[in-house]
Amino acid sequence: MRMSSADMQSCTAGRWHGVPPQMIGGVSTDTRHLHCGDAFVALRGPNFNGHAFAEDAIQAGATTLIGDLEGVQSWQDIDVPQLEVADTLQAYGDIAGKWRAKIPAKVVAITGSYGKTTLRSMLEHVLNRHGVRVAATHANNNNLVGVPQTLLAIDEQAEVALVECGISERGEMCRLAAMVRPDVAVITGVAEAHAEGLGGIVEVASEKAILLDYMTNEACAVLGDGVAGLLRDTGLLSDTNRNTVILDMESDADSIVKWQMSGRMVTLIRGTEEPLAKVVSGDLLPHSGAILSCNFGKWNHHSLATHPPRLLQVALNTLNFRCLSPPVTGHRMRRLPQQCWAGLVSGRYNLLLKRWAFGSR
């Protein structure tokens, strides 16, 4: 990330103390991960105060500090340029949103009550396999601190950015969506998981659906099983109130590719057409544009593959089951030992307790 001090002041409605550098090379909230020339954002919370680490930030290479009024007052003896803002967490998001507006990458925002990390990991793996320059959320950095961190780490050379958006309280999605402004918005599913600060399932759906209101022009929304129906039943979605392509994973539209597995045979079917392909064990999928993804949270339903119109503007010609080895972290997407033709991947998390079988001899 590179941003002028004038742009940083403008997007945060802040006030500089001292003469700032013309350009700032990065922004960080963690003194352990600062680079020389970065700005240090001092976050404040109930049990921590980042302003106390200003000296550590400077020693780590920070050339500017961003703090609130109280924090800046405590920095009077520190001789580096300081940007005073009303709220440092909000300013962090504002800076990230400004950077997102500058980058050319197609941004895919992924939210939902389950499956965000799994879907992001699988998409990242497939796109990387096809030579696409991808930036993506790392670990579980999908909240009001993690999303700005993800956006600010997107290189100008990236073609696609995969950004998870997780929420636990009302109002958070509005702030996240305003930063991300997705070209493709995915809602994997809606349930009462993590809903303590949101209410019931209708309130969860209402908060998740805010992401669709912040999509760019001619964007694409991909809605997991049951999502479109729930949003329509609660008046949160209509076919005419958004300038976007809506892909409902439960529909029989031509853009949706479903697959069925019987023994070692996987059959791909799109709409009412004849099967697109039949795959045995470790063969290739010859159908142009197939992306394998999960039908999250459905116990007795088949998974889905989809190629949304204009999705990422990337043509994926084949998907090789044998080379589908998504990155693993902890208990998510963990490969299981096996003595048969299929490679087993555990996707246990929250409401998700499934196994995916990939033909890997």
Image (spheres, rainbow, N blue to C red):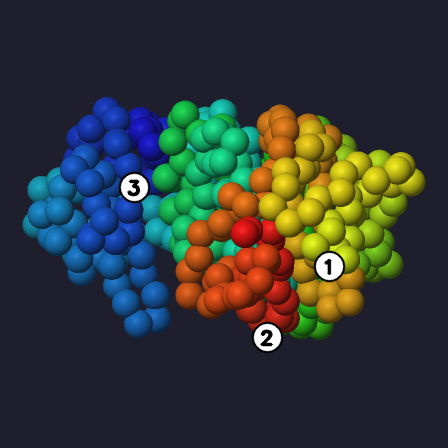
Q: Is residue 131 visible?
A: yes
Q: Give the Cα distance between marks 1 and 2.
A: 41 Å
Residue 305 drawn at (x, y percent): 71, 45
Disc 3 from disc 1: Cα separation: 51 Å
- Residue holding disc 1: 263
Left of 109 or right of it: where is 238? right
Q: Identify which residue is drawn at 73% across, 65% down.
A: 298
Secondary element type, mark 1? loop
Q: Which residue does the numbered mark 2 point to in the structure image?
A: 196
Mark with earlier residue (1, 2): 2
Q: Is residue 86 left or right of residue 100?
A: left
Circles 1 and 2 in contact, beta carbons < 8 Å = no
Q: Amino acid at mark 3?
A: Val
Where does residue 134 sit, x and y in percent of width and height?
46, 35
Which of the marked residues, 3 or 1, is nearer the chain's N terminus?
3
Image quarter for residue 270?
top right
Disc 3 designates what residue? 27
Tell me the kind of residue under disc 1: Gly
SS class, disc 2: loop
- Quadrant for the N terminus in the image: top left
**Does 334 sit above or below residue 266?**
below
First of labels 2, 3 by sequence position = 3
Where residue 226 sits in the image (x, y, percent)?
79, 59
Res. 65 image quadrant: top left
Task: Name the residue nearer the viewer: 51 or 113.
Answer: 113
Q: Could you give the CA–CA distance between mark 2 and mark 3, rounded to whole angstroms?
A: 32 Å
Give the residue displayed 63% in from the left and 29% down from the top: 317
| Residue drawn at point x = 44 percent, y = 38 percent | 135
- Tell me what residue is drawn at x 61 percent, y 64 percent: 355
Mark 1 crowdedness (10 Å alpha carbons): few <14, some 14-19, many ≥20: few
Identify residue type, mark 2: Glu
- Residue 22, disc: none
